[in-house]
Amino acid sequence: MTTTATPEHRSFEADVSRLLHMMVHSVYSDRDVFLRELISNAADACEKLRYEAIGTPELLGDDPKLAITISADPEAGRLTIADNGIGMSHDEMIEALGTIARSGTRSFMERVANTEGKDGAQLIGQFGVGFYSAFMVAEKVEVVSRRAGSAEAWIWSSDGKGEFTVALAALDEAPSRGTRVTLHLMEEAKSYAERWTLERIVKEQSGHVPVPISLITEPGADAVALSDGAALWTRPKSEITKDEYADFYRSVAGQYDEPAATIHFRAEGLHEYTALAFVPGARPFDLFDADRKGRIKLYVKRVFITDEAELLPRYLRFVRGIVDTADLPLNVSREMIQDSPLLGAIKKGVTSRVLADLAKLAEQDPDTFRLIWDNFGVVIKEGLYEDFARREQLLGLARFRTTASGEGWRSLKDYVAALKDNQTAIYYIAGDDASRIANSPQLEGFRARGIEVLLLSDPIDSFWASAAPDFEGKPFKSVTQGAADLGLIPLLDGAAPPSAEASEKITALLASMKEILAEQVADVRSSDRLTESAVCLVASDKGPDRQFERLLSAAGRVESAAKPILEVNPRHVMISALASDNDHVLRCDVAHLLLDTARVLDGERPTDANAFVERFNRLVTQSFGDSGGQRKG
């Protein structure tokens, strides 16, 4: 670029020099962001001209269509970002590119100096000094600008090492209006002059700025449109096709499936914003990442700001999409985002709308909602434990396998509608194996009475079930905890419930077993929940149920497990036979074997494998008679 006067040499302001030093030493962990920053600046310049042209239409001249053009020269290693926006005068250029004209600059620079990697990158970009990120990839940067309505153009040039020059530019080589930024790329950064790299970055980070973006891939080539400048989410829903939504979803989510649900709305009133969110049709690969971060992108006035703002709770982290607000400044910092009351209000509004639309979908299109629940139900249920304010709403959304559901799902609304006479609780059984808990002996008395029981096999289930007080006034109760209290609910076959009073022999047997097993169980008692099995283990009325206690113990949150209660079926033939036999050694062996049997049915192991085998061998040997090898009846 030629100039028409001797360039004036200037030094960067001290804070800019510090900033450039950080740039050169890779404060950014992702260098792609420089293009976003330059495009954002270009779009902002176009928006400023759009506003000024309202009062001064002649500023647009014979070029009313605002645009951003990216030109690449792979051979020369150059990249140019040009706009036909408002442009800069001499003084504006020095002010904009040589200083950081912001209040609180010193504290800002201290934050950046103490921040490493990506966090530093976001602070720099969001503070509004992202232009300097160009020096991460360029060994020299030239800026030619002509303010709209001006007869002069200016060229700014620097290698980022402390100084810059400003001079008049030849008008025949300057834009008629606007700014052209040319980057002379470093050797290791020349991939930024390649077509596929530029297309990827623009579509990922800047494809929805309010100004059309085109790309010229090499000198003399025709321009290729990368974006039309019309953000999809700003268009009326009635004008957007299903395919357009799907294409945008794939772009914003980085996935190739079809979205299962699309949620597009504009909030107006105290806070104004637009949200376009998608529920994926398949599980994202990072659904169970340890950090459990959401993937909603935040835009301000259609300019991408960050994808790390917490715009949805963690239990909705599978939702992909964007939120665009005009109520935040483009230079909003990460700290401002985290602490912003506006962002808190947006999060509340978007969360409520997503849950409301899911509830509507569950009612109107149960097949699609079933697909969503199959994929994400285990994550949504985290909200039952984490989001107390929305627990009732989430319980209404939740679907469960139950003893009555077969391979389908049941809602709690369905469950409550099918309550038996005198049933006062919502019963559940929790465990880590769905097939095992479905066949647990603790369910026998409930099945005999046709009482539906929720089968909870996800780790989060024990946490929320212990914390959820009720649904529609019905408390949640584990079938493995406390007394079953089934006596008031009739059996399905119409038979009278068995008497709660045990015979003298059974009472004596239970007392004997309690004495024998005193070190391992808190109590041995008669059961009304068993109809087929001889024994089962349950937890006391107080404290966690059996599965929850296991999880707490595995996490180191309980020092020692509480002793369980051994419930005995007084009507079982083995128990009746044992009650009639006063052989103390036999009772000891059988009592221990019954306890170990109950442990195995609960998914545990016998506490002493050698003792278990010895007792088993003695009983097997004793089961054969002494004469003729005849087996005892």
Image: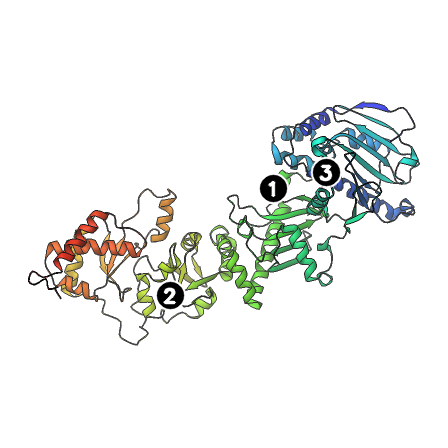
The 10 Å Cα crowd at callout 1, few under 14, some 14 to 19, many 20 or more, is some
Residue drawn at 50 percent across, 53 percent down: 379
Residue under label 3, please give it.
Answer: 192
Q: Where is residue 576, by image quadrant?
A: bottom left
Residue drawn at 44 percent across, 66 percent down: 407
Tell me how far mark 2 sits from mark 3, CA to CA: 67 Å
Residue under label 2, please give it.
Answer: 424
Q: Position of residue 462 (x, y in %)?
A: 40, 53
Q: How many marks?
A: 3
- The three-letter code of the residue at mark 1 reads Gln
Residue under label 1, please give it.
Answer: 338
The first of marks 3 and 1 along the sequence is: 3
Tell me how far mark 2 sits from mark 1, CA to CA: 44 Å
Which quarter of the rendered picture does the N terminus lie within? top right
The 10 Å Cα crowd at callout 3, few under 14, some 14 to 19, many 20 or more, is many
Q: Where is residue 146, by image quadrant?
A: top right
CB under 8 Å between discs 2 and 1: no
Q: Visible in this render: residue 355?
A: yes
Q: Is residue 464 left or right of residue 265?
A: left
Tell me how far mark 3 sits from mark 1, CA to CA: 32 Å
The first of marks 2 and 3 along the sequence is: 3
Q: Where is residue 30, by image quadrant?
A: top right
Q: Position of residue 554 (x, y in %)?
A: 37, 45
Which quarter of the rendered picture does the C terminus lie within? bottom left
Q: Is residue 597 left or right of residue 550?
A: left
Closest to the camera, between mark 3 and mark 1, is: 3
- The three-letter code of the residue at mark 2 reads Thr
The first of marks 2 and 1 along the sequence is: 1
